[in-house]
Amino acid sequence: NAIEYTSKEGKVDIVTYKEKDKIVLRIGDNGCGVPQEDMKKVFTKFYRAKPARNMKAYGTGLDLYLVKSLLEKIEGSVELESPNPDYKKGSVFFIYLPGTFDSNL
Protein backbone atom coordinates (compact mmCIF):
# COMPACT_ATOMS: atom_id res chain seq x y z
CA ASN A 1 0.00 0.00 0.00
CA ALA A 2 2.83 2.42 0.74
CA ILE A 3 4.05 2.06 -2.84
CA GLU A 4 0.55 1.93 -4.31
CA TYR A 5 -0.57 5.21 -2.71
CA THR A 6 2.66 7.19 -3.09
CA SER A 7 3.45 9.07 -6.29
CA LYS A 8 6.40 8.12 -8.49
CA GLU A 9 8.30 11.08 -7.05
CA GLY A 10 7.40 10.02 -3.50
CA LYS A 11 9.37 8.18 -0.87
CA VAL A 12 8.81 4.94 1.05
CA ASP A 13 11.07 3.99 3.96
CA ILE A 14 11.22 0.60 5.65
CA VAL A 15 13.17 0.23 8.87
CA THR A 16 13.46 -2.84 11.09
CA TYR A 17 14.52 -2.95 14.72
CA LYS A 18 14.03 -4.89 17.94
CA GLU A 19 11.81 -3.63 20.73
CA LYS A 20 11.79 -5.85 23.84
CA ASP A 21 10.50 -9.24 22.64
CA LYS A 22 9.16 -7.92 19.30
CA ILE A 23 10.56 -7.34 15.85
CA VAL A 24 9.28 -4.05 14.47
CA LEU A 25 8.90 -3.05 10.83
CA ARG A 26 8.34 0.68 10.41
CA ILE A 27 6.93 1.50 6.99
CA GLY A 28 6.62 5.20 6.26
CA ASP A 29 5.66 7.06 3.13
CA ASN A 30 4.81 10.55 1.93
CA GLY A 31 1.77 9.42 -0.05
CA CYS A 32 -1.88 10.44 0.15
CA GLY A 33 -2.13 9.61 3.88
CA VAL A 34 -5.08 8.62 6.04
CA PRO A 35 -7.30 11.19 7.78
CA GLN A 36 -7.53 10.88 11.58
CA GLU A 37 -11.19 9.81 11.44
CA ASP A 38 -10.30 6.90 9.13
CA MET A 39 -7.26 5.58 11.01
CA LYS A 40 -9.10 2.82 12.92
CA LYS A 41 -11.50 2.06 10.07
CA VAL A 42 -8.78 1.19 7.53
CA PHE A 43 -8.28 -2.15 9.32
CA THR A 44 -11.92 -3.19 8.83
CA LYS A 45 -13.07 -5.39 5.98
CA PHE A 46 -13.82 -3.59 2.67
CA TYR A 47 -13.05 -0.10 4.01
CA ARG A 48 -11.03 2.38 1.95
CA ALA A 49 -10.20 5.86 3.20
CA LYS A 50 -11.39 8.75 1.07
CA PRO A 51 -7.91 9.77 -0.17
CA ALA A 52 -7.32 6.22 -1.39
CA ARG A 53 -10.69 6.15 -3.16
CA ASN A 54 -9.95 9.52 -4.77
CA MET A 55 -6.50 8.46 -5.91
CA LYS A 56 -7.43 5.04 -7.31
CA ALA A 57 -10.92 3.98 -8.32
CA TYR A 58 -10.19 0.29 -7.86
CA GLY A 59 -9.41 -1.61 -4.68
CA THR A 60 -11.13 -4.08 -2.40
CA GLY A 61 -10.39 -2.59 1.00
CA LEU A 62 -9.07 -5.96 2.13
CA ASP A 63 -5.29 -5.41 2.27
CA LEU A 64 -5.00 -3.87 5.72
CA TYR A 65 -7.80 -6.04 7.09
CA LEU A 66 -5.87 -9.16 6.01
CA VAL A 67 -2.57 -7.82 7.36
CA LYS A 68 -4.15 -7.18 10.76
CA SER A 69 -5.98 -10.53 10.81
CA LEU A 70 -2.88 -12.54 9.89
CA LEU A 71 -0.68 -10.70 12.37
CA GLU A 72 -3.16 -11.36 15.16
CA LYS A 73 -3.02 -15.10 14.36
CA ILE A 74 0.71 -15.11 15.15
CA GLU A 75 0.34 -12.79 18.16
CA GLY A 76 1.57 -9.78 16.24
CA SER A 77 -0.09 -6.44 15.61
CA VAL A 78 -0.16 -3.41 13.34
CA GLU A 79 -0.56 0.27 14.16
CA LEU A 80 -1.03 3.35 12.01
CA GLU A 81 0.25 6.82 12.82
CA SER A 82 -0.05 10.06 10.95
CA PRO A 83 3.37 11.72 10.94
CA ASN A 84 1.80 15.13 10.59
CA PRO A 85 -1.58 16.72 11.45
CA ASP A 86 -1.93 17.24 7.69
CA TYR A 87 -2.68 13.64 6.72
CA LYS A 88 -1.78 14.41 3.10
CA LYS A 89 1.89 14.10 4.05
CA GLY A 90 1.81 10.31 4.32
CA SER A 91 1.41 7.51 6.81
CA VAL A 92 3.56 5.41 9.09
CA PHE A 93 2.66 1.80 9.81
CA PHE A 94 4.29 -0.22 12.55
CA ILE A 95 4.16 -4.02 12.26
CA TYR A 96 5.03 -5.89 15.44
CA LEU A 97 6.15 -9.51 15.06
CA PRO A 98 6.77 -11.86 17.98
CA GLY A 99 10.25 -13.31 18.39
CA THR A 100 13.82 -12.31 17.84
CA PHE A 101 16.40 -12.34 15.09
CA ASP A 102 19.77 -14.01 15.50
CA SER A 103 21.31 -11.22 13.41
CA ASN A 104 22.08 -7.68 14.46
CA LEU A 105 19.52 -5.12 13.36
Image (cartoon, rainbow, N blue to C red):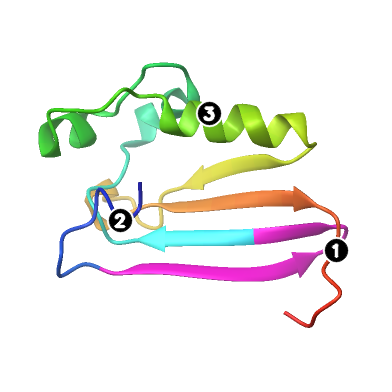
Instruction: Using the image, tell me which numbered label, if any, was put on residue 3.
Output: 2
Task: Name the residue located 56 percent from the left edge and 71 percent from the top edge.
Answer: 15
Q: Amino acid at mark 3?
A: Leu
- The secondary structure type at the circle numbered 2 is loop
Q: Is residue 12 magenta?
A: yes
- Within 10 Å of disc 3 (Cα), the crowding (few <14, some 14-19, many 20+) is some
Q: Amino acid at mark 1?
A: Thr
- The secondary structure type at the circle numbered 3 is helix
Instruction: Using the image, tell me which numbered label, if any, was put on residue 87.
Output: none
- Mark 3 — residue? 66
Prevailing secondary structure of the magenta residues: strand
Residue 32 percent location from the top left of the image: 22, 48
Q: Amino acid at mark 2?
A: Ile
Which residue range is magenta in the image? 11-24
- The secondary structure type at the circle numbered 1 is loop
* Image quarter in which the C terminus is found: bottom right
> How far apart are the alpha carbons under marks 2 and 1?
27 Å
Whether tag 1 and tag 3 are in contact, CB under 8 A, the answer is no
- Mark 1 — residue? 100
Q: As drawn, is 17 to the left or to the right of 53?
A: right
Q: Is residue 88 magenta?
A: no
> How far apart are the alpha carbons under marks 3 and 2?
17 Å
Image height of 88 relative to 74, above or below: below
